């Protein structure tokens, strides 16, 4: 018998409310306890965090994240939703967390299902704006595009685009942007940024080489320019990418 079906077995004293049974006399202590217990079990099934990914003190939770696993956590037999962005804050009602029900998870769960590939692997999206001043230091100061996803996992870039609203000076010399893991020898995607007009163009997805790794355990994907920093150039860029997390 399911928890919800127990509601139909509740006994009322004298109020008519089909399909519930109307006893027509005082309830015994056992009948009253059974009614309260049944209602508690139903509510508990709605708010229980037993099937929600457990809270992890090392995870940065963010209410605005597109990743459902960074919005919600299970803790103390309850479901918790993050408020703002934080890490290391044990769930309790207040400024960092609020208790929610399964109903609040449904839209996010459906979105995850819609974005899954034929094998059930979730395809994720990321957007990163990079100011021109930071483009000019992408060799010496790479910028993180996607954070590491945990031990035993690696990030695979599926597609990427680079959008630029041309300002007045084109980037020169070192203009090959790569999407690459921290210690990756081979990049996963490449794109030249020497455009002199507004553009929104795709990265070339790399197949890798036999000498090194593209997929690296528990490492972020960075935006990087090999060899040296670009010279000149004053246009901001935006990178869009789709990716999946692979279990190694």
Image (cartoon, helix red, strand yellow):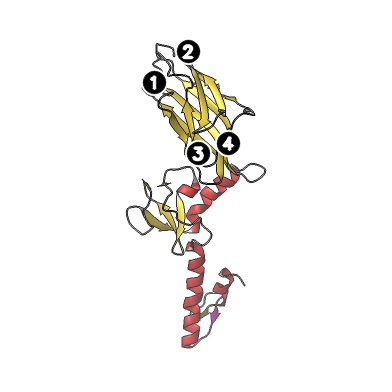
Residue 27 visible within the image: no
Decide which of tag 2 and tag 3 comes sooner along the chain: 2
Rendered location of residue 90, percent (x, y):
38, 57
Q: Dot 3 corresponds to which residue? A: 219
Q: Quadrant of the N terminus?
A: bottom right
Instruction: Write the residue at 56% across / 69% down.
Output: 4
Looking at the rendered image, the disc whose residue lies closer to the viewer, 2 or 1, is 1
Crowding at label 3, few (<14), some or many (≥20) Cα neighbours within 10 Å? many
Task: Determine the CA span between mark 4 and mark 3.
Answer: 9 Å
> Does 119 sit left or right of 179 as displayed?
right
Foreground: disc 1 or disc 4: 4
Q: Which residue is mark 2?
A: 197
Give the SS element for disc 3: loop
Q: Secondary structure at mark 1?
A: helix
Q: Which residue is mark 4?
A: 215
Percent of width and height locating residue 107: 52, 49
Residues in magenta, as a range: 20-25
**Quadrant housing residue 154:** top right
Select label 1 or label 3 by which is in front: 3
Q: Quadrant of the C terminus?
A: top right
């Amino acid at each position: 018998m399911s928890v919800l079906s127990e509601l139909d077995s509740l006994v009322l004293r004298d109020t008519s409310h089909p399909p519930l049974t109307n006893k027509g006399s005082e309830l015994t202590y056992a009948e009253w306890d059974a009614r309260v217990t049944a209602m508690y079990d139903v509510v508990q099934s709605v708010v229980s965090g037993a099937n929600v990914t457990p809270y992890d003190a090392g995870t940065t939770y963010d209410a605005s994240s597109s990743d459902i696993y960074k919005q919600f956590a299970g803790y103390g037999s309850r479901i918790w939703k993050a408020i703002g962005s934080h890490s290391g804050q044990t769930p309790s009602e207040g400024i960092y967390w609020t208790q929610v029900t399964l109903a609040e998870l449904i839209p996010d769960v459906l979105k995850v299902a819609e974005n899954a590939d034929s094998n059930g692997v979730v395809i994720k999206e990321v957007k990163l704006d990079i100011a021109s001043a930071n483009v000019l230091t992408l060799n010496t100061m790479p910028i993180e595009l996607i954070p590491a996803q945990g031990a035993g996992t690696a990030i695979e870039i599926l597609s990427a685009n680079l959008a630029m609203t041309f300002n007045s000076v084109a980037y020169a010399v070192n203009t090959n942007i790569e999407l690459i893991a921290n210690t990756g020898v081979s990049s996963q995607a490449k794109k030249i940024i020497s455009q002199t007009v507004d553009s929104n163009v795709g990265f070339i997805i790399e197949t890798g080489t036999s000498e090194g790794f593209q997929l690296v355990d528990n490492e972020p994907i960075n935006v990087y320019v090999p060899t040296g920093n670009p010279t000149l150039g004053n246009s901001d860029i935006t990178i869009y990418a789709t990716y999946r997390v692979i279990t190694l």
